[in-house]
Amino acid sequence: MTLVREDATSLYEQIATTLRDEIEQGVYEPTGKLPSEAQLSERFQVSRVTVRLALDRLTDARIVERKQGKGTFAAKQRLRHRLDVLRGLHDSIAGQGARARMELLRMEACDVPPGLRQVFAADVTRCIYLERLHWVDEEPIALAQTCLLPEAGTVTFEQAERMSTYEVLEGVLGWRITDAEMSVTAVGSPEDVAQRLRIAPHLPLLVLRRASQLADGSTCESTVFHIRPERFDLVVRSGVEARFVG
């Protein structure tokens, strides 16, 4: 592209527009890495200060991201998970066209963890525990730790491996989910979670806690998600009643 130097639009805005268009066209795939500031300066015949301003504009718009010591990269698709819709995390991700998959790390019968005993009825002391890793573009983005009522012991490993929790509950067990209570907090990543997500310990993570209820009000599942925030937005739409999708 030849810059219009007499144009009222500043040079750095023209460069930013050109780079944005090229990113959308997939010019920098598969790595997503943009040319260096020096290379862009030479290409557009402008100073590196002007190039830096263009990259700042794209960074502010979340179109690119800078990685110290590595360069500038096209930002990965940000994913949205609505909290006002009863939909599993995997189904939500896959529904946005992302290359998503689940990896079932553990499935076992065990005592209900102390931190979840108040979620279930007082007589529920055992549960079926599932631990899944959610992947997008071959990168781990969330760890899900799920406790199901012990009646879910009929679910096979193969079913839990290929089906989301809500698919298992409704499709395999025939349980009708009518409501779910969710809360969101932020924590520094515990070491074991950081290892699963392949990040440094103590980096900030979103924590989504969900407890799903049947028609009689009893809790049938509780899940804690540790989510990497750089790829995810948790969204609530005002004035919309929660509903089940999928």
Image (cartoon, rainbow, N blue to C red):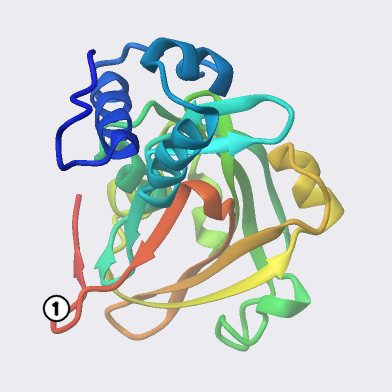
Q: Position of residue 180 (x, y in %)?
A: 36, 75
Q: Is residue 184 left or right of residue 8?
A: right
Identify the residue shown where x is 67% and y is 81%.
117
Quick one: quadrant of the N terminus?
Answer: top left
Q: Is residue 151 left or right of residue 79?
A: right
Task: State how many labels appear.
Answer: 1
Task: Name above or below for residue 138 compared with residue 96.
Answer: above
Can the viewer see residue 61 in this picture? yes
Identify the residue shown where x is 23% and y is 25%.
21
Q: Position of residue 7 (x, y in %)?
A: 14, 34
Task: Name above or below for residue 121 compared with residue 109.
Answer: below
Identify the residue shown where x is 62% and y is 77%.
124
| Quadrant housing residue 235 | bottom left
Q: Position of residue 196 (x, y in %)?
A: 73, 40
Is 58 in front, or is 162? 58
Q: Which residue is mark 1?
A: 240
Can the viewer see residue 29 in this picture? no
Label 1 crowding class (10 Å Cα cut-off): few <14, some 14-19, many 20+?
A: few
| Quadrant housing residue 90 | top left
Is 220 in front, or is 65? 65
Is 18 in front, or is 79? 18
Q: Position of residue 157 (x, y in %)?
A: 56, 33
Q: Amino acid at mark 1?
A: Val
